[in-house]
Image: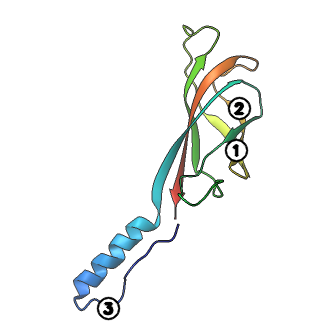
């Protein structure tokens, strides 16, 4: 994603400073994407993290944070699951390897919602 800017040619120094400040604010914009999947939990688990950039088919940059926001036991929806921290590693090609998610049991089928947060620069 290329940011188009105009930082030169302003007669008023305050306008020039404003242009620099606004551009600096947009250089690193926080982005988030939800990843939904239904699977029998296994460790390690491969999570596909989609790109948020319009011209990028496969995500190239790793997210900064991946969290498990919701986990529902498919066989018994009345079981309360409070997913916890996610231990993960970016493997590239739009994929992250999840080594562990607190609260999930290996061999149980879940409907899962992950949130991947990153920075667009």
Residue depicted at x 64% and y 54%: 59
Quadrant in which residue 77 is drawn:
top right
Other residues around mark 3 within 10 Å, as few (<14) / some (14–19) / many (≥20): few
For the point 28% across and 76% down, the residue is 18
Residue 52 - label: none
Secondary element at image label 1: strand
Q: In this rendering, would 17 be left or right of 28?
A: left
Query: Residue at 50% across / 47% down in the picture?
Result: 32
**Colour option used:** rainbow
Q: Which residue is mark 3?
A: 9
Most foreground residue, 1 or 30:
1
Give the Cα distance between marks 2 and 1: 12 Å
Q: Earlier in the sequence, mark 3 or mark 2?
A: 3
Q: Is residue 108 above or below residue 51?
A: above
- Dots 3, 2 in contact, CB < 8 A: no
From where the camera sits, is residue 103 visible?
A: no
x, y percent for residue 119: 52, 57
Quarter of the figure with residue 11? bottom left
Dot 3 or dot 1: first in sequence order is 3
Which residue is disc 1 drawn over? 96
The answer to whether one can see residue 8 in this image is yes
Measured Cα–Cα span from mark 3 to mark 2: 53 Å
Considering only vertical position in the picture, is 96 above or below 24? above
- Mark 1 residue crowding within 10 angstroms, few (<14) / some (14–19) / many (20+): many
Q: Which residue is mark 2?
A: 100
- Residue 23 picture location, percent across and down: 38, 72
- Judging depth in this view, the residue of 36 and 31 nearest the camera is 36
Which element is circle 2 on? strand
């Amino acid at each position: 994603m290329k940011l188009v800017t105009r930082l030169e040619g302003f007669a008023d120094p305050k306008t020039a400073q404003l242009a620099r400040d606004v551009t600096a604010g947009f250089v690193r914009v926080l982005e988030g994407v939800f990843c939904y999947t239904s699977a029998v939990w296994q460790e390690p688990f491969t999570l596909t993290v989609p790109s948020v950039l319009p011209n990028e088919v496969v995500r190239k940059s790793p997210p900064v944070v991946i969290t498990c926001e919701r986990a529902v036991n498919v066989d018994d929806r009345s079981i309360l699951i409070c997913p916890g921290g996610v231990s993960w590693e970016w493997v590239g090609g739009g994929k992250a390897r999840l080594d562990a998610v607190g609260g999930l049991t290996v061999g149980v089928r879940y409907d899962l919602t992950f949130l991947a947060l990153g920075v667009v620069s």
